[in-house]
Image: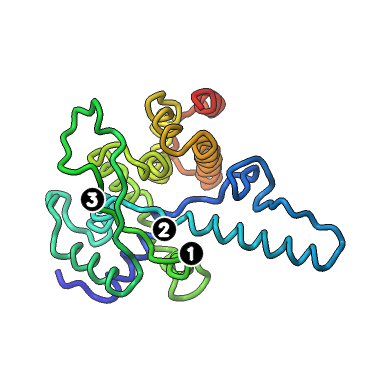
Amino acid sequence: RNIGYLDVKLCFVAFVAVFSLPMDPIYANGNGGVGNGYEDEHEFTGSEENDNHALTSATTTATIKKEKIRTSIPLSVVFALWRKVLKIPDRQKDVTDEVSYIRSTLVLLGFLELSEIDREDLIGSSQKFDSRTIECLKVHDEMHQQYGEYMAWGDHNASFRSTIEMNEQHWNYAVMKACEEVGSNIYTLRMLPLNTMRANHIKETFELLKEKTFVRRRVRILGASGAANAHVTDVDELLRLIEERIDDDEADIEPIDEQDGVLNSYQQV
């Protein structure tokens, strides 16, 4: 099929929508410790000079946190998403001209950039990989991240909100399945629970969050604070999605013992 401007635009918006992290839990500050949102060491004292300094520091901390949202995504996972967005048949597993064109165009336009991440499960893995690193794509900068979010969820006529809401579960399912073939890495350790729950696989998400091997790898790669932050964020987002779908009277909600799932997830950490 011929790829047009709207196809390229939709693939970028889908990239931002599927691979965006939710907001951090309220306890996490810029250093990953216990605090309140973007809390900084400077307190508001009533002095205009000190208060302005505190506001500047808080803004800087918030900017740093936003920059961390630009996650590197394995190319094979991105291509799986774009094949689903472009409605390329599943039987075409190889990289097609269409997705290669989308990648080249978005990189040349400066919306995305190439990057690499390390594989984390080479030792003792039954899978054989040709390289110790994984080729990835990520959003080029914060301005393009915000543009993608505006086009995905903005309240305007050109927004892709309805398209995303209609296809989000299918897109995330394609990503979830593609993650099974790339092995353990910093992307899957941070994002796989989110992609799984967004694909409406609620039970599988709870199982993943309480799986000992997954949690141990998450702690080893993300660090104790980063893993705890990721786990709390995932559980919060999972409970939010369950509540949202119950409110929408969706009939395909799996019967889940939420309390047991949350307790077991936290116990593993």
Question: In this rendering, is residue 125 above or below 3?
Answer: above
User: In terms of sequence position, does the residue under pointer 2 or pointer 3 come before the other?
Assistant: 2
Local packing at callout 3 (Cα closer than 10 Å; few below 14, some 14-19, many 20+) is many
Q: CA distance from mark 1 to mark 2?
A: 9 Å
Q: CA distance from mark 1 to mark 3?
A: 26 Å
Residue 167 appearing in the image: yes
Q: Quadrant of the N terminus?
A: bottom left
Q: Give the residue pinned by disc 3.
A: 76
Residue 106, percent from left and from top: 29, 69
Q: Amino acid at mark 1?
A: Trp
Q: Amino acid at mark 3?
A: Ser
Under circle 3, the secondary element is helix
Which color scheme does this rendered protein use?
rainbow
Q: Give the residue pinned by disc 1.
A: 153
Question: Which mark identifies residue 17?
Answer: 2
Find out whether the residues at labels 1 and 2 contact each other: C-beta distance under 8 Å: yes
Residue 46, percent from left and from top: 87, 61
Q: CA distance from mark 2 to mark 3?
A: 17 Å
